[in-house]
Structure formats: C-alpha cells, structure tokens
Amino acid sequence: MSAKRILLVIGGGIAAYKSLELIRELGRRGIGARVILTKAGTEFVTPLSVAALSGEKVYTELFSLTDETEMGHIELSRSADLLVVCPATADLMAKAVHGHANDLASTALLATDKPVLMVPAMNVRMWQHAATQRNIAQLRADGVTVMEPDVGPMACGEFGPGRLPDVPRIVAEIEAMLRPRSKRLAGRHALVTAGPTREPLDPVRYISNHSSGKQGYAIAAALAAEGARVTLVSGPVSLRAPEGVDLVKVETARDMLKACEDALPADIFVSVAAVADWRPVKAADKKLKLKGEGKSPAIELTENPDILRTLSHKKKKRPALVIGFAAETHDLEHHAQEKLARKGCDWIVANDVSGDVMGGLENEIALITKDGIDRWPRMAKEEVSARLAQKVSEALGRDRDGLSLAKE
Ligand code: C5P
C-alpha cells in the first residue's frame, strides 16, 4: 500500500493538544499529516510544535499569497487521502453544515473531494444542544463520518458526552477509512428491512412502534459501500435512502413480506425492521367512533407473518446468509440464542434496548452465531454497520467457492 496522507484540521478547543499525540501515532504507522491550524486552534497549540511533529509546513489563517503560489487552497484540500477535523468544534461543524468558506479550514472542507472524518470534542451542554445534534445529523446525511465523543469528566468540570475519543480509537477510525474499499460484496445482492411497520385500525389510526430505521439504513449503506447491490425495504421513517441503495417503501408487515419476496433472490438478508407482531383482524373502512360512555371498541388482533422466519425457511430462494435482530430488555443472550434456533437464521445481532437505543445514535450489540458470542463495545450505529458489513464480506468471501451467487 502506498504511503497515505491526511489533511488534519485542528480546531480551537482544549482537546487540541491531543491532536499532537494523534500526529505522532499516525506517523508511527506511516500515515503523514499535513495540518491546517485554525485561528482558535493556535490559542491551544503552536504552529511550531505541530510543524515539529508533522515534519511539514503548517497552514494557518495567516495563509499568505506566498503560500497560495506554493500550494493553492484547492490543491491543499485535495492533496490528502482523507480530511480529518480533530478536534471538531461545534462552530466548525456548523460552518461545514452551511457551506461557509470564510477561512482556510472551512474553505478546505467545502473544496475537498475526499472523505471527511469529524472527531468532535466540546462541553457536554454544547454537544447535547439541539443545534449541534441537528448539525451532526445533517453532516452524516451529507456523507461525513462523525465519531461519537467519549463520556466522562470534562476539562470544564462537567460530566457527560463530549470528550475527544481516545487517540487509539481515532487512529483505528482513520486507518479503517484509509483502507482501500474491498468491494468484497461486488456481485452480491443484499436485502435489508428497516424501520417499523404500521398496522391500520381504521383510515386514521394504526399500531406501530418507536423504531427510527437508523440502524437498518446504516447497514444498507455499509453493505453498499462493500460493493453489494442493496434493496432496502423500509417501513415509514423520516430518513433519506443511502447513496446507491434501492429503496422500497411499505407500510404493513404483509406489504413488507411481499416486497421482500419480490426482491428475492438475494445472497444476504438482514432483518432489522421492528415488524409489528400483531395487526387488527379488520381495519375499519370508516373512522371508529366513540360509542358512548364505558363502551370502547374491542380490537381483535391477529398475528402478522414472521418475515425473518419465512425467508429463513425458503426451500429454493433462501439467502445464503440470513441475519436477524433481537431487541431485548433483559436476558439478552439467552433470548437471542433461542431466537437463532426458532427463526432458523444464521446470525443474530442482539441489542439491549432498555436504554435509548431506539432512535438513538449508538448501539451496543452481541453477534451470536452457531460458533459462539462476539460482544462489541458501545459504538455509533454507523460503526456497528461497517463492522457487520465487514463480517458479512468475510463470511461470504470465505465461502465464496461453496456459495453460488443468487441467480436473477
Ligand atoms: O420475535 P422478534 O420480533 O423479537 O424477532 C426479531 C427479529 O425478527 C428481527 O430480525 C425482526 O426483523 C424479525 N421479525 C420479522 N417479522 C416479524 C417479527 C419479527 O421479520 N413479524
């Protein structure tokens, strides 16, 4: 692999000093760093210390016409394989969301044609503020990778999420982003379900659940990034379809099953959707009315088809690798093991939903296969997805000779 190089934007925050350690660690791994130090960044680290560690000229807001003749700001933004903002302050992220280009760092972010990694660090209240969270969601929707900060005591004396992730975690993320995309799933068809289903009671009411679809959409995106053709069958959610993914929107469990069956054959099926277990036997064709005091309408329910179980038991068109999800609030692994057998799938991704997983940005999962249990630390849903897609690639790559491609 030829030597890799990043363009590192150091923002102004107390965590800026850790970017010096980051430069050193990257250097040890043969990854070069050219640095833009923002004006606020120079309040925390000096251009001289950065230059000494990176062995390169440091670009600051005092970017002069001489610099521009040496290396234009456009070239600077494209001279690297990856653009890393560390620490990414609330201000830098807000600028990137709105496409500002009023200083060197924001101009480089706007002009780059390379992947971008933001490593946020800020006060807990600033991190939790609706504006910051909105900006992060927008950056992710725009294709920027935003790491989750660490939780712990802060320099300002408060406690919570907002600390810069540990340097080894940042290095691992940078190495993963610099690794050439394997495209090991090229030629494979992946079918993913996501979101909730809606089971109508009458024309205006339905039974549903809190699933946001975030995990399923992120898995669809990660499988597409590994080169798979992806069909994403989604219940009603407010997310945009990931780049390069075929989105089929459905409402009910029965629609979802039909859409999945229509999408077969597939090599991989990942059943992430929170399918409603029951539906009203009959959806009234007119809005149900109050019948008077003490007389509420009785709703008779019937079981919905189990999509995961149905696809796992297909005789002819069973996908080679079937992955189910088990959202549990207690006895996670016991229930997941039982589910693996009952549903007839190959792997179960077990997650504890007793916290804020549904709708939240992070997930803590255990991957359960016939070979045993692999517990993963808590991480962003995108990181869970990238890892899972990697595991899928490895499994299908290993069995490539044994598993024939799904025939159209
Ligand atoms: O039984 P439980 O709902 O906990 O199982 C969860 C797994 O089964 C998930 O992978 C979910 O997508 C799938 N499922 C399904 N159809 C149903 C119910 C669950 O595909 N009707």
Image: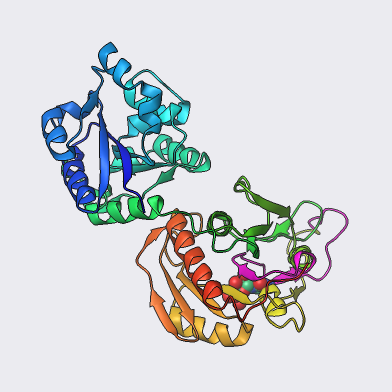
Q: Tell me if I can see residue 277 in this picture.
A: no
Q: Nearer the viewer, residue 81 or 132?
A: 81
Q: Residue at x 77, y 81 (%)?
A: 316
Q: Main secondary structure of the magenta part?
A: loop
Report the label total.
Answer: 0
Screen quadrant of the C terminus: bottom right
Along the horizontal axis of the image, is 80 left or right of 207?
left
Q: Which residue extends farthest top?
A: 65
**Please, is residue 343 above or below residue 176 in the view?**
below
Q: Quadrant of ligand 1?
A: bottom right
**Please, is residue 144 above or below residue 97 in the view?**
below
Q: Which residue extends farthest right?
A: 285
Q: Measured from the top left, where is residue 70 in percent x and y?
A: 29, 20
**Please, is residue 252 above or below residue 156 in the view?**
below
Along the horizontal axis of the image, is 318 left or right of 37?
right
In the rendered structure, which segment of residues is drawn in magenta? Answer: 261-290
Q: Is residue 317 magenta?
A: no
In which image quadrant can residue 29 be found? bottom left
Screen quadrant of the N terminus: bottom left
Q: Is residue 283 magenta?
A: yes
In which image quadrant can residue 32 be found? top left
Q: Tell me if I can see residue 335 in this picture.
A: yes
Q: Measured from the top left, where is residue 302 in percent x and y?
A: 76, 75
Q: Residue at x 23, y 31 (%)?
A: 12
Colour option used = rainbow
Along the horizontal axis of the image, is 401 left or right of 379?
right
Q: Residue at x 47, y 26 (%)?
A: 98
Q: Measured from the top left, where is residue 140 in percent x and y?
A: 48, 43
Q: Residue at x 24, y 56 (%)?
A: 168
**Please, is residue 132 above or below residue 186 in the view?**
above
Q: Measured from the top left, where is residue 196 in percent x and y?
A: 64, 60
